Image (cartoon, helix red, strand yellow):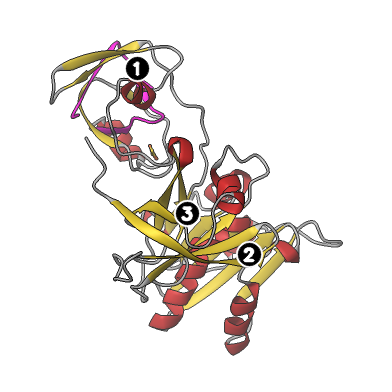
Amino acid sequence: MSRTDLLPVRVHSVTYEAEDVRSFELRSPGGGDLPRYTAGAHLDVLLPGGIERSYSLLDQGLESYRYRIGVQRSATSRGGSAFMFDGLKVGDIIEVTTPSNSFELFEDAPLSVLIAGGIGITPLWCMVQRLEQLGRRWQLYYATRTRERAAFLEPLRQLESRAPGRLVTVFDQEPGARMLDLQAIVASHGPQAHFYCCGPAGMLAAFEAATASVPASQVHVEYFSAAQAPARGGFEVMLARSGTTLFVPDDKTILETLLARGLEVPRSCMSGVCGTCETAVLEGEPDHRDQVLSERERASNKKMMICCSGSLGPRLVLDL
Ligand code: FES
């Protein structure tokens, strides 16, 4: 089980986008084209110490010679954004995964309503550019603590000036600011609108509550962090392809147990939000803790995210 989705890229430039937000331009070291991507896509950056972090791609995938990702320095960084800000220099070569997309834009929607909180603007900025290119209607609600922390505000305002009213900004730590009223926002758009949200956990929870009566096919959410604690061990996992059986101890997840045995398994977020570690379940009943699978997929028990989900029974058989 080795990674086949990795690309070497050179850090071509780093740009200040807002307070604690930088964009990193990455190019192929040989100057060649990079695999294309669609609006809403992300890639994972492999960092020292086995850390992998997912970052959304900016722009709209039309430029094949470069990727740009947006990164916010986290006050509680466990090494990801701290390394990106302090350890990475222009000219360095790093490895990234080929882009993948778990936050696809439905391009034919008559109206796309986009709701961003903080660095959650990155995939939505990409979507805005794509919708502009297609000539589709969009409406963006963008909340940050202060305007200094609002990345990509200038190009957004330029677009908005061509059709005023499409951009609503809220700087919720500035005097007199009001929070976005997501219930009112959802209620104010027609039944055909598609709704997208990317932001902090509190915003995502409010968004899910506000869109509870909207058809699921019109609601799109991008999670950056886990909403639930991972399930822990205390059960057996049989790897069907090799016939190996492992015991997952109480203090480890399935993925941690496999890695501790030297098995290389595709992974990225390690918290159930990206889908990279999705694994087919051949027997057993998973204890699902991810934010990737739909209710129907969970109920089928045919696949699971092994970075965070566990087992409700004493044994799982996995297609590994
Ligand atoms: Fe991201 Fe498991 S590694 S869902």
Q: Nearer the viewer, mark 3 or mark 2?
A: 3
In terms of secondary structure, where does tag 1 sit?
loop
Per the image, the residue denoted by label 2 is 142
Q: Residue at x 80, y 61 (%)?
A: 177
What is the CA distance from the residue labelled 2 to the residue labelled 1? 40 Å
Question: Who comes first in sequence, dot 3 or dot 2?
Answer: 3
* Residue 38 covered by magenta stretch: no
Q: Which residues are magenta?
A: 303-320
In terms of secondary structure, where does tag 2 sit?
strand
32 with respect to 113 (left or right) = left
What type is the residue that disc 1 sits on? Leu
For label 3, being within 8 Å of ligand 1 is answered no
What type is the residue that disc 3 sits on? Tyr
Q: Mark number for residue 55?
A: 3
Give coordinates of residue 202: x percent, y percent: 62, 44
Per the image, the residue denoted by label 1 is 312
Q: Quadrant of residue 76?
A: top right
Q: Nearer the viewer, mark 1 or mark 3?
A: 3
Give coordinates of residue 51: x percent, y percent: 46, 39
Q: Residue at x 41, y 53 (%)?
A: 94
